Image: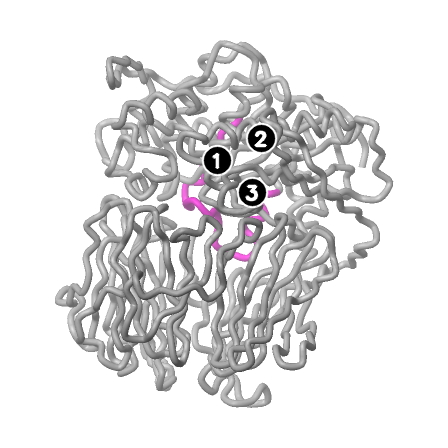
Amino acid sequence: MKKEPYTWPNVKPPIADTKEHVRIMFGDTVPDPYYWMYDYFGKGPDSTKVVNYLKAENNYLDTMMSGTKKLQENLFTEMKGRIKEKDESVPTFKNGYYYYVRTEDGKQYYKYCRKKGSLDAKEEILLDVDEMAKGHAYYAAVGFDVSEDNKLIAFGVDTVSRRQYTIYVKNIETGEILPDAITNTEGAPCWASDNKTIFYTAKNPVTLLSEKIKRHTLGTNAANDVLVYEEKDKSNYISVEKSKNNKYIFIYSQATMSSEVRMIDAAKPTESFKIFAPRISNVLYSVIPLEDKFLISTNKDAKNFKLVECALDKTNAENWKDYIPHRTDVLIQSVDEFKDFIVISERKNGLTQLRIRNLKTGNEHYIDFGEAAYAANISSSPEYTSTVLRYNYTSLTTPNSVYDYNMNTKEKKLMKQLQVVGGYNNEDYTTERLYATAKDGTKIPISLVYKKGFAKNSNAPLLLYAYGSYGASTDAGFSSTRLTLLNRGFVYAIAHIRGGQEMGRQWYEDGKMMKKKNTFTDFIDCGEFLVKEKYTSKERLYAQGGSAGGLLMGAVINMAPNLWHGVIAQVPFVDVVNTMLDESIPLTTNEFDEWGNPKNKDAYFYMKSYAPYENIEKKNYPNLLVTTGLHDSQVQYFEPSKWVAKLRATKTDNNILLLHTNMNFGHGGASGRFDYLKDIALNYAFLFALEGIKE
């Protein structure tokens, strides 16, 4: 490895056409000359023009990055080389069978398998996804659900990458795919106890909203499936699932700030669903059925959530009694139930704790993880009668690890740790937990990792990552691909900014709606702190984020353009106002409680004040790589393409601006085990070109 400035080809970028379009709201007139880019999915007069523009941008990127082609190939090979190609997951026991996934050398996908009663039993391949995916540029199989009699498996398939799944049913004994094919679903089938009834969530074909729960009987035409619930509130997501003890079918309807649960006996699938507890404004709840009562996790009079209990036949909120009271310094994240235990995932001081309670004795204890910064979560423990909890554990230097924990004896057993092929020694790397001070005095945690030999002298390149929305917490976990950065001298840092939920529910509420700008200023303050403390310099500071984290990238380059040398914005949500005004776009109505509804004047002007697309100005911007997918259903392709077009026409610098559109994939990128590494190789090659790092 050596340093040598990369020579960017001297070619002109594509210039997008403009077309008059004006938005007028609350007396505010906003011209939008790139609005025509919305046209692709409408198949209107500009659809070919849209595709041609995206292809031109792709060609420009290929030309500009042509000098890194060999580097990208090497990076791909290097990262792929760390993956153990022939591998097998830790088997999970359920209803008499051990289930696992195994992968084979050179294969992009996997085989979903089981063995009856013993790991020494004969293997049954339930789904050979390697075979199923042949002939498809994209293939996702999800929601595997085996009937209680163990004879049938239902699953969802998406071959377009818009998260519109067709549900299929396979007879495990004969290998036959049944004629039952249910289109346009969320892809999460749920069996009733009669082994012939499936509940599923149907999507609106235009908005892709989850709006109906239907009941399908095997052998009947899906067009005649029975509607059992229709959600009228377009801000709610809905889903259907069976309880872990197999006694109930639950329908969940949840928005950002309210929820409602319906239920039936799983053995009586034709019964009408009854409401567990009517929805209450600003109250969220979820239900955990035990043998003799229900537990409910709720934020009712409890910002950080608490556990309450009620009798099996008295479920309305007035019957709820505190079981684990609210604590101001501890967030309850989730609960996993067993016949004799419950496991509560809590978050304190930004870190997850797993709390075990014995339901018979009332005794409690916590699992000791032994590290100061880490990521831990409850894994799949589907057997209700088990006394063993499975959990996942990782840190910035500890590869992903699967543990089995005996809740009676408190013994933990490492079942599997991610093998980094070629060797990996965690002693070669150092992690730190720092705190930046935001402008309002709030302490913002930063987790970072670097290879030993790093010196705090402002000379190291540093990549700062964050998400910061929806209450999603970004924990400090391991990545084998990240070693490619660290081994070339990069520091990698995660900013745990407001909008996530790392420090409790208030952390989330202080980074949403009319407080959304805290997310952006927190990130900027973290960047400035890392420069001040000499972990890097402005000339070597890079930023990365995707989706809502892409909104973050767009906002911070408007607000602090001179702080970053380069920015990677992946599938970025940047045209906030126009998207939130268009209720035909997937997710829009679901997310009014996250961003606000711009049909309300205050929300409109606040949103407009930070929306990246709206706030592009004639000034210098950092080097920028933007990625998107033509079939993206979460953040549609036209947001980043409009943003890039407007940036090209407006910015005053000669810095690099690249747009890459994957013409086959959507929001999550490639579906195979290895293809996604090509995108990471492109990102890293972009950073290395800016740094002058050559192989």
Asked if residue 635 can be seen in this view, the reply is yes
Report the Cα–Cα distance between label 2 and label 1.
Answer: 10 Å
Identify the residue under disc 1: 511
From what the image shows, is residue 495 above or below residue 216? above
Q: Horizontal placement of 328 versus 529: left or right?
A: left
Q: Position of residue 344 (x, y in %)?
A: 53, 65
Residue at the disc numbered 2: 522
The location of residue 342, given as percent across then percent down, is 51, 72
Viewer-nearest of discs 3 and 1? 1
Which mark is on residue 679? 3
Tell me the quarter of the image containing the C terminus.
top right
Residue 71's place in the image compared with 401, above or below, is above
Magenta span:
658-680
Please, which colouring scheme is shown?
one colour
Residue contact between numbered discs 2 and 1, judged by CB atoms under 8 Å: yes
- Left or right, 432 with respect to 47, comes to right
Q: Is 521 in front, or is 638?
A: 521
